[in-house]
Image (tube, grey):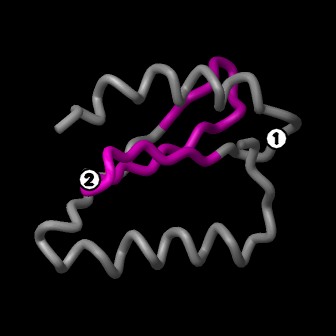
Amino acid sequence: QFSLINAIPQCLAYMLASLNGDAPVYGLVTNGSNFRFIALENSRPPTYTLSDELLFDRGDDFAPVLQVLKKLQVKGETYPA
């Protein structure tokens, strides 16, 4: 199983490259069973916030992951592949 910590710097690099205007950029790192959301604010300097690590294995974290994804979808924002 891969640690999410190793993926965060690469995700932040992509997010920094995607900053445009004042809108925040959102990211997600996962290894398939663990999930962590990242929010990057376009401030001087840019600042980021990490969610708690969510685990599908616990069962009770499945709903929060889906709620966050649904909320991002409702905002109608597009994300680079």
Image x and y of residue 6, in percent: 32, 23
Residue on which disc 1 sits? 22
Image x and y of residue 79, in percent: 74, 49
Secondary structure predominantly adopted by residues drawn in magenta: strand
Q: Amino acid at mark 2?
A: Asn
Q: Residues within 10 Å of mark 2 (few under 14, many from 20)?
A: some
71 above or below 48?
below
- Which region of the structure is painted magenta? 26-48
Which part of the image, by quadrant, shows the C terminus? top right
Which part of the image, by quadrant, shows the N terminus? top left
Q: Amino acid at mark 1?
A: Asp
- Specify the quadrant of the image occupied by residue 2: top left
Q: Nearer the viewer, mark 1 or mark 2?
A: 2
Label located before the other in sequence (1 or 2):
1
Q: Which structural element holds mark 1? A: loop
- Specify the quadrant of the image occupied by residue 16: top right
Whether residue 37 sits left or right of residue 59 in the image: it is right
Q: What residue sits 58% from the left and 77% below the top?
A: 70
Asked if the magenta segment contains residue 47, the reply would be yes
Image x and y of residue 63, in percent: 34, 81
Image x and y of residue 73, in percent: 68, 72
11 above or below 57?
above
Which disc, if any, is residue 9? none
Q: What residue sits 80% from the left and 56% below the top?
A: 78
Residue on which disc 2 sits? 34
